[in-house]
Amino acid sequence: MASADTGIVFVIDDDAAVRASIAGLLKTVGLSSTSFGTAQEFLLSDRPDGPSCLVLDVRLPGINGLEFQRELAEAGLRIPIIFITGHGDIPMSVKAMKSGAVEFLTKPFDDQELLDAIHQALDRDKERRRQQGELVGLRTLYKALTSREREVMDLVVSGMLNKQIAFELGTSEITIKIHRGHVMRKMQADSLAELVRMATKIGLPQGKNKK
């Protein structure tokens, strides 16, 4: 099983010897792996939810590696991919890299090249998951604000001053200051700059014209 520290490597290659070789290599450096002969087997498997990457052969029975990369992207399954192939060419590698592949290795490849690519891919997935977790947390905090606090936050991050917000919402400046304080506390923001950064991450509109 994958751990939070190391993650898991999925290997898809129709050559059993290649699968066994990669699995053995990964084991020597303490990495967990699960192997599949086809892309369909991977999709039907019960995969753990944690940092992961995919070592994917280009030529596979059924759907090929490049088509599978496209299908994963269309399905919203964001897993870093390292392509391996015995029949690669430059156009193929360019297409794979432009579509987000971490690396494109031609067999026979150096073990360290593969390990370096795998560590890079796992680090990329860990960072994506960290950012995703942060985003979920920020959206939860934002949803916990009252409707008026959300209005105030939206206007604060758009660049409006307290007195402008008070005029916009038809209330007093002191009331806006109180709401603003509540927003800062509930969003766990230490500064206006941090609040703006949070708003950017959760997709609030900014840069409105001041009134």
Image (cartoon, rainbow, N blue to C red):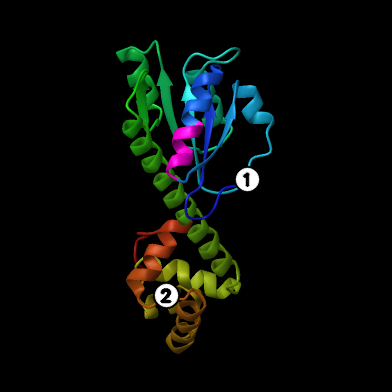
Where's residue 80, x and y in %? 45, 37
Q: What secondary structure is the stretch in magenta mostly built from?
A: helix
Q: Residue furthest bottom?
A: 174
Quadrant location of residue 63? top right
Q: Is residue 5 left or right of residue 88?
A: right
Q: Residue at x 50, y 53 (%)?
A: 132
Magenta-drawn stretch contains 25: yes
Q: Which mark is residue 189?
A: 2
The residue tagged 1 is 48
- Between 7 and 140, the one lying in front of the other is 7
Q: Residue at x 34, y 61 (%)?
A: 209
Where's residue 210, x and y in %? 34, 66
Where's residue 143, x and y in %? 59, 66
Q: Is residue 210 left or right of residue 58?
A: left
- Between 177 and 106, the one lying in front of the other is 106
Q: Assign a secondary structure to mark 2.
A: loop
Three-letter amino acid code at the position of disc 1: Pro
Q: Which mark is residue 206?
A: none
Three-letter amino acid code at the position of disc 2: Ala
Report the magenta residues as a range: 23-29
Quadrant location of residue 194? bottom left
Q: Assign a secondary structure to mark 1.
A: loop
Image: 172 above or below 18: below
Q: Quadrant of the C terminus?
A: bottom left
Where's residue 118, x and y in %? 40, 38
Image: 106 above or below 73: above
Q: Residues under labels 2 and 1: Cα distance?
A: 34 Å
Q: Residue at x 43, y 68 (%)?
A: 155
